[in-house]
Image (cartoon, rainbow, N blue to C red):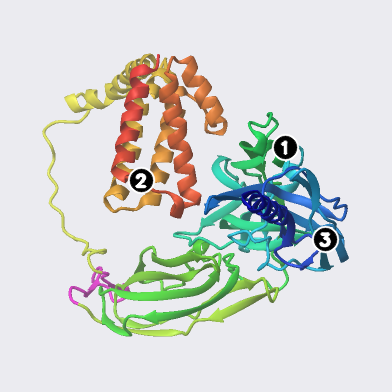
Amino acid sequence: MKRIVHILLFILFLTNYLLAQKLVTSISSNKVAVGETFQIQFSLTGSGSNFKLPTMPDFEIIEGPYQSSSTSITNGVVNQSSSLTYVLSAKRDGKLTIGPASAVSGGKTIQSNAISIEVTKGKANAGNQGGNSAGQAVSKPTSKDISDNIFVRATVNKSKVYLGEVIDVTFKVYTRMEMQMRNFTKLPTYDGFFVQDIKNRQKTSQTNETINGITYVVGEIYKTFVIPQHTGKLTIDPFEIECIVRQKSTRKPRDIFEQIMGGGYEEVLYPLKSLPVTIDVQALPEEGKPEGFSGAVGSYTYKAELSKEKLKANDAVNLTLTLSGKGNIKLIEPFKVNFPEDFETYDAKTIEKISVTENGISGSKTFDYLVIPRHEGEYTIEQFQFSYFDPVKKEYVSIPSPEFKLRVEKGEGTSAVVVGGSSAQEELKVLGNDIRYIKTKTNLKEKDHYFFGSAMFYFFLFSPLIAFISFLIIRRKNVEQNKDGIALKSKRATKMAKKRLSVAEKHLKANNKEFVYIEIFNALYGYISDKLNIPSADLNKEHIAETLKNRAVSENTIQQLITTLNNCEYARYAPGSVSGDLNYIYNSTVELITKIEDEIV
């Protein structure tokens, strides 16, 4: 009886074991677009080996495999399961089929089910990206095709503009891989442009963009605005960054799991460089250009106000002109106003309230003119006009100001005098204390001595010779002191660096993190340029590191300098991603300059 029970239990166990050995294929979506990524998972219940993927000529493996496995013991029974996950994209549209996968389990070959997928044309669905947790398409190709899956690009809202027109410049990274931006290695340059960066820019969310049928995850690195300063073909130079990408490893698998999955993965440092962008800058049209046009380009309004219309002579009055709008408002100079000749005028006081946001450069600019009429009368401040060029309408727009009437009454201290006693002589009005009464009677006395032959005569006679000799002595002394100009410049380097750091210290007290990093960056670059006598055009990290090494500066100090420069660069273009104690960063920079001074020879 016992033998029968044992046989039945064995048969039952064997039946459960065989039934438990199964391989199942599942996908994250059965309807996708060409180039859109989706997940496919092969799940094996029980143990197995020699897993083989189905042939998939119509699909491209973008990512994977990823392995997961689990083991549990229930009432003494060991249950095992494992799965392999891949990220795929379809190469063509239509109703496509993925055949069964196979594996050896329990001494026999088992197969999974086949899968049918409907692939459509058009853009990928941003909400279905292969089940990635962030909704992003990623890939992990080998090194030979990294450039096809990740790149950076500089984009502008228009490549043909008028002189003075504002251009949006956006630097983006396009990727189908898991990546992490490390640091900037070369910042873009804007020769021939006036640049306005966005302050306190909020982080932008990532988007999807399809290029040539391939969907990429797109993230903005930063955005700025540039204004061309002269006509012709102007170029926005490339910029370079380094990022860390994850790719398939070329080393041998470390264990059986890596062998089943086809090897492991490793993180590699990969440089990215954008292409240059050419802007065609046209001159503003001559036809219809108003007289006295100041170069304003954009869309503007303005108003003019006089502080008072009635006053006394020698009192001050303010004429305020307020310009508002969007465009190159930062570059607009004060207006030329024709005041009456008898008015004493001063340079306009300029007040700016300009903001640079994602939407462009806008705000207001106020010009406050202080004038003082010197004598009484009725005066007119003639009508004048502000003109600007509208690049949308492609025409000039002129806005006239009102004509101002000013009544000046007689003030204190003003009077009229008559020179001489004849009625034919003209009556002159005294302008404050500018013209004084001419005395008609004088009391002259003959002197006892003459200037010729006096001590003062000889002093003036020989003073030019004495001054010339003094000049030669001082000049020779300066030449001797400045023979070694490089050494003098080097001595001043530390002093100038501390002076630059004083600006950073002010921002530190105000807790302006971004400006602290900018001033530290400027201080270090200026110090290195002066100390090592390196022109600004040749300043780069590689040259700096090599020069310091030749001057016997330690590797640790050099690495600390390069790291500080990298952190400052990153803080400028991604201020929201930078953290750290500002006091510690500032004090570390001061200590770094001191260490360089001590070590350099």
For marks 3 and 1, the one nearer the N-term is 3
Determine if the magenta segment contains residue 121: no
Badge 2 element: loop
Q: Is residue 468 left or right of residue 388?
A: left
User: Which tag is nearer the camera, tag 2 or tag 1?
Assistant: 1
Q: How many numbered badges does the structure rendering display?
A: 3
User: What's the amino acid at mark 3?
Assistant: Ala
Q: What stretch is highlighted in magenta?
A: 412-431
Identify the residue at horizontal 39%, vertical 75% (top origin).
320
Residue 143 image label: 1
Identify the residue at horizontal 52%, vertical 33% (top origin).
536
Q: Mark 3 points at which residue?
A: 114
200 versus 153 height, above or below = below
Badge 1 element: helix
**Circle 2 residues within 10 Å: few <14, some 14–19, many ≥20:** few
Residue 248: image location, x then y, percent: 69, 38
Badge 3 element: loop
Residue 580 image label: 2
**Circle 1 residues within 10 Å: few <14, some 14–19, many ≥20:** some
User: What's the amino acid at mark 2?
Assistant: Gly
455 versus 222 height, above or below = above
Find residue 498 and report its image quarter. top left
502 versus 394 height, above or below = above
Residue 412: image location, x then y, percent: 18, 76
